[in-house]
Amino acid sequence: MATDVITLITQDHRTVESLFDRLKKGEGDTKATVAELHALLVAHARAEEDRVYPGIDAHHGVEEHKEAEVLLDALVRATPGTPEFRSTLEKLVASVQHHVEEEESDLLPQLRKSADDKRLQELGRAFQERRNAELKALGATAQTTGDATKAELYEQAQRADIPGRSQMDKEELAKALKRADS
């Protein structure tokens, strides 16, 4: 399984995008999806700020994390299905998409140029440890599967390069992802 920091960060970005899609479509338990999104975004941001950003010029990224956390807290407080919820979700999606685009087009390529493979692996382990500790502190599972569909779990398993994933059912995929994350 790839554990370099760039791969781990971009995997989280894709997971967040799938959670946004689920919320926009009204699929599954909205409150549970919001809780999963909250845990993942907070853990991801703190891991980046503590383990990745100190080595690069990422002050703007920290500010964007703060903006996203304010919107995320408002989303948690909003009642699903209301105009306030939809408006807050739209603002959060726009804010996070902007951040992801900047990070993936500027910060991460900068990091790839400035660090060798060994350093990217070290940063990946540090990022993952910090992220998982934060998820645990927030009461989330290390692999945020929540009420993910089999297709979403399969996508995560594909990104994690889990062998035999195409023959696994939903429960087996969730277990394999949990093992791969520890």
Image: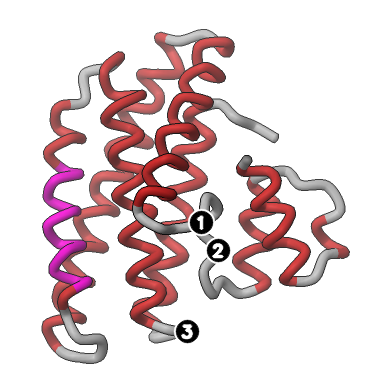
Nearer to the camera, 5 or 113 = 5
Q: Position of residue 131 (x, y in %)?
A: 42, 40
The residue indicated by pointer 1 is 141
Counting other residues with Cα less than 10 Å from the Cα at mark 1, is it few (<14), some (14-19), or many (20 or more)? some
Mark 2: amino acid: Thr
What kind of element bears circle 2? loop
Nearer to the camera, 99 or 35 = 35
Which of the image's four quarters has the C terminus? top right
Above or below, comparing residue 78 to residue 98 in the picture: below
Q: Position of residue 43 (x, y in %)?
A: 35, 45
Q: Which mark is residue 116?
A: none
The residue indicated by pointer 2 is 145
Q: Position of residue 107 (x, y in %)?
A: 32, 27
The residues bearing labels 3 and 2 have C-alpha atoms spaced at a distance of: 12 Å
Q: Is residue 48 left or right of residue 131?
A: left
Above or below, comparing residue 2 to residue 144 in the picture: above
